[in-house]
């Protein structure tokens, strides 16, 4: 694992959202964090699956309501292809039912867009957990 200055570990992130504006907001938020970079974007679930396989990101952020495949369906295809890669769902439709469905397909966290301020801490948390598990 390569490190940047002062021990920062770089992270490549795939974002998938059917709204271009939301992809821009996510890119700005992610790339404002030292060492984090958006390696690919997708506008629907099929693109998300294909780009995840192509770019092999360190972490994936999926919208729930996307055309072609929704975020849970996309995560269900990505998880077996990229085991150990954390997946977050960032959605307007967060609920306990969505969380249960997402967990079944390997999603680590479902985050409501209405509480988007917790996205960066959630990324840090699942990233740390995934690296702790790899080290154990």
Image: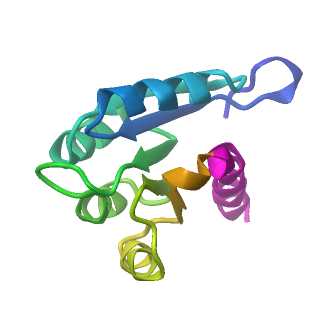
Quarter holding the C terminus is bottom right
- Identified at 63% across, 58% down, the residue is 130
Residue 92 position in % (x across, y down): 41, 56
Q: Is residue 79 left or right of residue 42?
A: right
**Closest to the observer, 117 or 132:** 117
Coordinates of residue 133 in the picture (x, y in percent): 67, 64
Residue at left offset 19%, top offset 39%: 47
Q: Is 113 on the left or on the right of 122, as rendered? A: left
Give the side of residue 11 with respect to residue 13, left or right. right
Foreground pick, 101 / 75: 101
Q: Is residue 132 magenta?
A: yes
Relative to residue 10, is residue 48 depicted above or below? below
| Position in image of residue 55 (x %, y %) | 35, 32
Query: In the picture, residue 44 is in which quadrant?
Result: top left
Tell me the magenta residue range. 117-136
Q: Is residue 111 above or below residue 23?
A: below
* Residue 132: x %, y % from top left: 73, 59
The quarter in which the N terminus is drawn is top right
Q: Nearer the viewer, residue 75 or 4?
A: 75
């Amino acid at each position: 694992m390569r490190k940047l200055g002062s021990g920062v570990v770089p992270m490549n992130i795939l974002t998938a959202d059917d709204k271009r504006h939301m992809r821009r907001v996510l890119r700005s938020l992610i790339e404002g964090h030292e060492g984090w970079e958006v390696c690919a974007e997708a506008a629907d679930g099929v693109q998300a699956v294909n780009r995840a396989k192509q770019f092999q990101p360190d972490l994936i952020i999926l919208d729930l309501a996307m055309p072609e495949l929704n975020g849970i369906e996309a995560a269900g295809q990505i998880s077996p292809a990229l085991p150990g890669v954390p997946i977050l769902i960032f959605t307007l439709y967060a609920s306990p039912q969505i969380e249960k469905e997402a967990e079944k397909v390997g999603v680590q966290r479902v985050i409501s867009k209405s509480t988007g301020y917790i996205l960066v801490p959630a990324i840090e948390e699942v990233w740390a957990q995934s690296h702790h598990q790899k080290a154990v």
